[in-house]
Amino acid sequence: MRCIFAALMGNTTTVEFKKEDYLQWYHTMMLVRRFEEKSAQLYGQQKIKGFCHLYIGQEAVVGGMVTAISREDKVITAYRDHGHALALGVSANAVMAELYGKATGCSGGKGGSMHMFSKEHNFVGGHGIVGGQIPLGAGLALAEQYNNTGNVSLTFMGDGAVRQGALHETFNMAMLWKLPVIFICENNEYAMGTSVARTTNMLDIYKIGLAYDMPSFQVDGMKCETVHEAIATARERAVNGEGPTFLEIKTYRYRGHSMSDPASYRTKEELNDYKKQDPLETTKATILAKNYATEEALDQMEADIMKEVDASVEFAENSPYPDAADLFKDVYVENDYPYIMD
Ligand SMILES: Cc1ncc(C[n+]2csc(CCOP(=O)(O)OP(=O)(O)O)c2C)c(N)n1
């Protein structure tokens, strides 16, 4: 355990990654980035309304996640959820239509930006109440343990959410029952306009887990390599019946908290320091240096992604709004309720 700890605390990895991993990371991150840039534009045109929290800057977290998990694992997160949905394979069409509030969206157009959901992709949301998803994530893990599936729950949260009391109750139960859950705090340094330093004397969030004897690590979140290794190691422990892990993944959002935030609480220099470590740029540089793909091939990949994103806008534009008669559908359990996880 000591050597894993040393590897995760630094910004290097002990794993040899394959060409396929790098290409998948680049594809995932590029899809999320271009999709969200388009969403921001559409929000400005009032095509997308209501709350909308962009993930731009944090893409290496979901990039590293997808190569480290099984597609049967359950993933749950807060409202900054477009990246998780897209990375797990929910189509750009279904995510864009959801942003538009259209019936073809992944939550039937009734969830919007904060409530992406896909039973088919084992993505259990998309939750607007800060920290509300933490106990739910442990519940998902309990179901996997009870049914002896060998799957794990990946329970994401922001740095603001770790101050919720529910986290402590959940950590306690998860450790007591050795639940197969990976708690992942995406520490992007701010909860709305409030920095971590303004809310706590303990800046190393991962240490919260140590109070419960939970293996807890800090991870460089600007690199898919370190994220993948941390999640894969935690997953192995969970699958082997060794219980939960807490990962504090250090990342940064380039945009404001939501579309209405000018982000005046931070400096341009701070933002630029993170942009210098941009995971799309560093992944591209590695791919080119290792001759995993040519620059032209990567440009082609990007052009194809842009087409996919543009097509999703057309799809959303041409989709119908939910029927008024469906207003009370999907609220309580129904026999044919489409979102219950079997
Ligand atoms: C229980 C609760 N309290 C307050 C809010 C209002 N609120 C929405 S987002 C947010 C900040 C959360 O920040 P963080 O958990 O760090 O996530 P990030 O936005 O950085 O992804 C707050 C306080 C809420 N949605 N739920």
Image: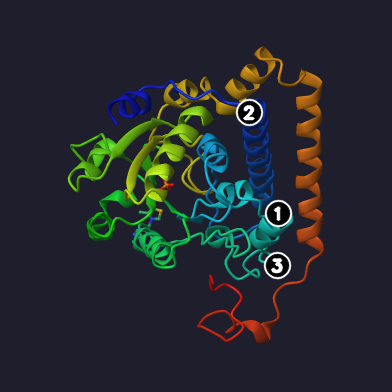
Q: Position of residue 55 (x, y in %)?
A: 54, 43
Asked whether 203 or 118 is in front, the reply is: 118
In-image side of 56 versus 297 (left or right): left
**Label 1 SS:** loop
Q: Does the residue at mark 2 contact the one at mark 1 (Cβ under 8 Å)?
A: no
> Badge 2 is on which residue?
22
- Marks 3 and 2 in Cβ contact (< 8 Å): no
The answer to whether residue 170 is above or below residue 301 is: below
Assign a secondary structure to mark 3.
Answer: loop
Q: Closer to the N terminus: mark 2 or mark 1?
A: 2
Closer to the eye: label 3 or 2: 2
Q: Which mark is residue 91?
A: 1
Q: Which mark is residue 225?
A: none
Amino acid type indicated by mark 3: Lys
Residue 199 location (% of width, % of height): 24, 43
* Tag in front: 1 or 3: 1
- The disc placed on residue 102 is 3
Label 2 within 8 A of ligand 1 by Cβ:
no
x and y percentages locating residue 65 in the rendered image: 52, 41
Q: Amino acid at mark 1?
A: Ser
Which sits in the foreground, 317 or 293?
A: 293
* 140 over 237 or under it: above or below: below
Please give the name of the residue rendered at 54% of the width and 41% of the height, measured from the top-left corner: 62
Q: Quadrant of residue 153?
A: bottom left
**Which mark's residue is nearer the viewer, 2 or 1?**
2
What is the C-alpha distance between the residues marked 1 and 3?
A: 14 Å
